[in-house]
Image (tube, rainbow, N blue to C red):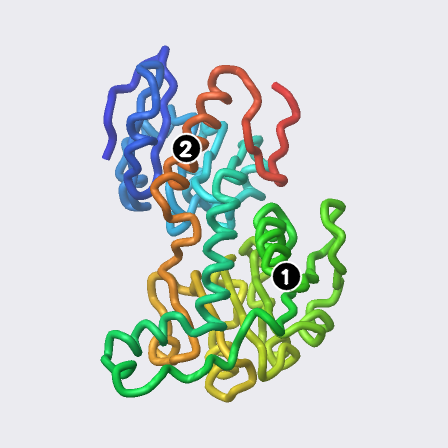
Amino acid sequence: MSTGSISSDKIDLLIYGPARPILENGFSDHFVVHKAETRGDLERLTPAIRDRIRGVAVTYHTVRADKDSLSQLPKIEMVASFGVGYDHIDSKYAAEHNIIVTNTPDVLTEEVADVAMGLLISTVREFIKADRYVRSGLWQTQNYPLSVGSLRDRKVGIVGMGRIGQAIARRLDASLVPVVYHSRNPSKDVSYKHYPDLIEMAKAVDTLMVIVPGGASTNKMINAEVLKALGPRGVLINVARGSVVDEPALVQALKSGTILAAGLDVFAAEPNVPDELKTMQNVVLLPHIGSASVVTRNAMDQLVVDNLKSWFSGKAPLTPVAETPFKGR
């Protein structure tokens, strides 16, 4: 489906994915905005419209802007993606075809770090389980048992030390929890101990908090071997991408007592969650809400709009991704 008419003196944009009001209403009359919520909608756009589209706003990670999609838009100059992760965008294809890809970092950093910290505390102190206990009326007959987990005797290994990883580390510092981290290269911005080997870090800590990008290089990096190294006091918190964790291995580790508990905001096949995880009392499950507050999602939407406006006003993109750096016009 599309809105607006083709005009030689206007810039044609495509909003690709679920409708978002700030995106739909954020462009002046200098732009013609077309909409395609699904791949089918994209393919139903007329060839004349597809041939004129110069910019695309991808509104959610469940919509893939892959080679097959992007190749249908011969004049595309920019893909502005909603979210900090962009594994649903074929950035390699974009780079090869001089297409700038942008994401929405920074505006969601503190929100996601808040959720990560809340998920950690909820998991180790059993908040969800304790809430159910009160609602069931059991507290009227006996006190809730002491939680096995606590922050007081934990050491956290952060997997990924980018913007959000650093924000999580600051919160752990404030809670007096020791922090180390694993990443491909040491960060110049922090003084925490760096582990180049993930297995060695898992052996040295009892909590892993995962905040790395998705994609082939991180696919199932949290596997059975890592979980075994984490050990029976181990807690896994994932606010990254579901693909980063080997889900069947995690289910088995939780069932067997290989690790103690897990807090998960993301899953391999969202919105589908393994039934075995749903039945476990030692798992906290969230529906991918890391950045899902009105104030933060509005800021993310606005950054998508601002990237496109900046580019088509002849200026540099505000937040280009590493694979498509701005090299001048």
Q: Mark 2 points at which residue?
A: 56
Report the amino acid beneath label 2.
Val
- Residue nearest the viewer, comparing 248 with 95: 248
Q: Quadrant of residue 272?
A: bottom left
Mark 1 packing: few (<14 Cα in 10 Å), some, or many (20+)? few
* Residue 185 image position (x, y, % from top left): 75, 53
Distance in Å between CA atoms under marks 2 and 1: 44 Å
- Residue in the image at 36% along x and 11% along y: 9
* Residue 119 image position (x, y, % from top left): 46, 63
Residue 176, numbered circle: 1
Up-down: is 294 above or below 151?
above
Secondary structure category for the residue under label 1: loop
- Residue nearest the viewer, comparing 304 with 119: 119
- Residue in the image at 53% along x and 40% along y: 105
Sequence-first tag of 2 and 1 = 2
Image position of 307 (left or right of 288): right
Q: Quadrant of residue 268?
A: bottom left
Q: In which quarter of the image is residue 174?
A: bottom right
Image position of 184 (left or right of 304): right
Report the amino acid beneath label 1.
Leu
Q: How many marks?
A: 2
- Residue in the image at 60% along x and 35% along y: 324
* Residue 252 image position (x, y, % from top left): 49, 83
Mark 2 packing: few (<14 Cα in 10 Å), some, or many (20+)? many
